[in-house]
């Protein structure tokens, strides 16, 4: 039986003020979760709960629906595993807030032109 070849992958994690991109070599057949754990990202970001974090590969969610879960997804050479942060606010609510802010700014501009 031959030696299992190594593959090169990247682990990506972005915070509002800092981005992490960790290149590493893992054995062919390694799971996305195994690569994330091997990357040491939790040493750099101790607040990151890998067991709860959502992940994807090249923006495709590893959610068990269209793609396997992180512990089942078998990495390919040059894959980029992305660790996603939870949303801070519902996207619909954020859009409403932006629209309201824009409306208020428009009203201020109109008031300044009149005055």
Image (cartoon, rainbow, N blue to C red):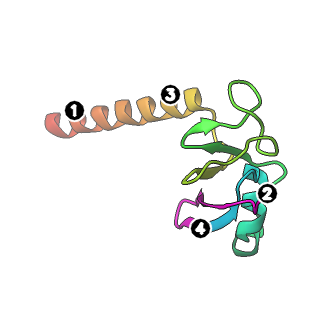
Q: Which residues are magenta?
A: 1-22
Q: Secondary structure at mark 1?
A: helix
- Say few, some or many: other residues with alpha carbon within 10 Å of mark 3 (under 14 / 14 to 19 / 20 or more): few
Q: Is the C terminus in the top left, top right, bottom left or bottom right quadrant?
A: top left
**Disc on res. 30:** none
- Say few, some or many: other residues with alpha carbon within 10 Å of mark 4 (under 14 / 14 to 19 / 20 or more): some
Q: Earlier in the sequence, mark 3 or mark 1?
A: 3
**Marks 3 and 2: which is nearer the front?**
2
Along the viewing direction, whichever of 4 and 11 lies nearer the viewer: 4
Q: Earlier in the sequence, mark 4 or mark 2?
A: 4
Magenta-colored stretch includes residue 66? no
Q: Is the N terminus in the top left, top right, bottom left or bottom right quadrant?
A: bottom right
Gap between marks 3 and 2 measured at Cα: 39 Å
**Disc on res. 96:** 3
Q: Are marks 1 and 4 in contact (CB under 8 Å)?
A: no
Magenta-colored stretch includes residue 4? yes
**Disc on res. 34:** 2
Q: Is residue 87 above or below residue 45?
A: above
**Which residue, given by chain and number where applicable, does mark 1 sit on?**
110
């Amino acid at each position: 039986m031959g030696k299992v070849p190594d593959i090169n992958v990247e682990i990506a994690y972005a915070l509002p003020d800092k981005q992490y991109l960790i290149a590493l070599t893992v054995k062919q057949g390694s799971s996305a979760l195994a690569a994330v754990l091997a990357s040491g990202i939790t040493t750099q970001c101790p607040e990151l709960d890998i067991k709860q974090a959502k992940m994807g590969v090249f923006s495709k969610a590893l959610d068990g629906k269209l793609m396997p879960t992180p512990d089942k997804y078998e990495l390919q050479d040059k894959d980029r595993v992305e660790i996603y942060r939870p949303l801070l606010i519902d996207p619909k609510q954020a859009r409403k807030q932006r629209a309201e802010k824009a409306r208020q700014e428009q009203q201020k501009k109109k008031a300044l032109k009149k005055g």
